Image (tube, grey):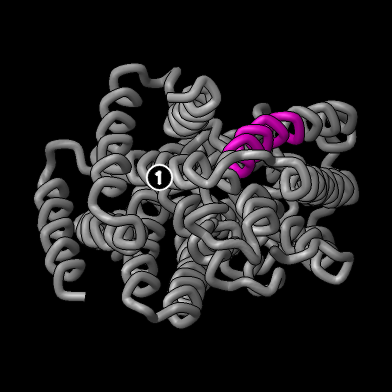
Amino acid sequence: MLRLFAVQGTWNYERMLGVGMGYAAEPLLEDLKAVDPVRHGEAVARSAEFFNCNPNLAGLALGAVTRAEYEDIPGPQIARLRTALCSPLGAMGDELFWAGLVPALMGAALVGVVLGAGWWAIAGFILAYNGIRLWTSYWSLRLGMQSGMRVGSAIGASWLPRAIELIGPVAAFTIGAALPLVAAWFLTAFGWPAGIGAAGVAMAGIALTRWFAPFLTPVRFALAAMIFLVILRRVGV
Amino acid sequence: MIELSPEVVIPLLVWGTLVGLDLVSVPQAMISRPLVAGTVAGWLAGDVHTGVRVGVVFELFALDVLPVGAVRYPDYGPATVASVALGAGSYWQLSLGLSVALGLVLAMLGGWTLQLVRRSNARAIQSRAAALAAGESSAIRRLQYGGLLRDACRGFTLTLLGILLAIVLKENARLDEQTHLALTLVAIGSSLAAAANGAFRSSGRSARFKWLAAGAGAGVLLAVLA
């Protein structure tokens, strides 16, 4: 299971997570070598082919494919299973982790930092995220191994779809709460005029980066605004 | 102002390398989140408060990023570490703007180096395509360790470059106090815009937007009471 944490170690635009999945599959396929060395070679080759999904749910595909290899399912059928799992595991994992859990916990951590929790807020974020992720990795690998070719229906019947529905509003709430708190935390040190200036920059940033997206990213906007400001100061404005 | 001696720089380099690796390759334990990376970097540099402030600003920028599929995004981890190295030991109101400017340039550079590593990984895989097709486990292992090493080198180089630039800026940046203050306000405003943009995009016009608005209301209330 630990190898799943390095599943993106060889990320590239051709096979994406493919080689990382092969690396994670290696110890799981070891027993196949003694039973059927030819099949083992084919399974190892298949394990490193193109694959992409959210890394935190990769265990579902890894477990299911490994079980299918041991059950002597024909190779093309296993390749189709891998391909079929890419999109749903990518979409569900991204919704659950990148658009849900990470902003939810980070929003809470930011609120904690602003309210004076300091290291505790940061330690809480790290422990909560990694605890949930560790358990999800264990659960996903086990469910994949138990389900094999029927992993699709097993995912549908699991807690995943419900958790995705619940985590989105939590993330929105904590980020919503964090933003005014962080703004006040920074700007009270400067007084009202400076605060209004920073708010003006924020409003301009929101409007311009939406109008001129994708060219004008927030990073480009910030750098452009800073360069503009330094030029204005140099010419004496 | 804290001097960037070897006793400070070496731990920062190690931390920046780990943070660079964590973003994509291993272990994705979220130590690469700017809030975490910045706070620990501040502790290593002897100024936790600046680390937290810099970390929060870059965290707001990072909240705009949704790292899905093959999307390209800035790498804020080593950038945050270098920014903290620049700002440590100074009044945050004066140093934050310039630190964030350095960090944003490094973050963009970091995003570009991620593409380089990914292309380099692809070339390594092509060179071992026959061994992969033959099902050689040793080829997979070598590719994996090679990929991790390339990413570690990327994180190390990025952090080193950032710290060198921080040393140069510490010595040579000649800006008056008003400009420093204004840069800090621009950095704060821009980071809030980035986070708000990310939040609006994620919420859309769904029920999630109502939760965002409710959260903002609670945040305003807490800010008034705190």
Q: Is residue B185 above or below residue B129?
A: below
Residue A125 image offset from top left, x and y in percent: 44, 72
The quarter of the displayed image where residue B10 is located: bottom right
Give the left or right position of residue A49, taking residue B28 as reference.
right
Judging depth in this view, the residue of B35 and B103 nearest the camera is B103
Judging depth in this view, the residue of B221 and A36 nearest the camera is B221
Name the secondary structure under disc 1. Answer: helix
Q: Quadrant of the C terminus of chain B?
A: bottom left
Judging depth in this view, the residue of A160 and A127 nearest the camera is A127
Which residue lies at the image location 55% right of the left edge and 25% below the top edge?
Answer: A234
Residue B150 image offset from top left, x and y in percent: 83, 44
The quarter of the displayed image where residue B193 is located: top left
Crowd band around label 1 with a 10 angstrom C-alpha radius: few (<14), some (14–19), many (20+): many
Residue positioned most to the front: A236
- Can residue A199 be seen from the camera position used here? yes
- Can residue A41 be seen from the camera position used here? no
Residue A24 image offset from top left, x and y in percent: 70, 57
* Stretch in magenta: B102-117
Which residue lies at the image location 13% right of the left edge and 37% below the top edge?
Answer: B205
Give the left or right position of residue A107, taking residue A74 as reference.
left
Which residue lies at the image location 61% right of the left edge and 44% below the top edge?
Answer: B103
Which residue lies at the image location 59% right of the left edge and 57% below the top edge?
Answer: B32
Residue A160 image offset from top left, x and y in percent: 32, 60
Q: Quadrant of the N terminus of chain B?
A: bottom right
Judging depth in this view, the residue of B205 and B186 nearest the camera is B186
Q: Is residue A122 above or below residue A104?
A: below
Q: Which residue is mark 1?
A: B185
- What is the three-letter code of the residue carrying label 1? Leu
The chain letter for the residue carrying disc 1 is B
Most common secondary structure along the magenta stretch = helix
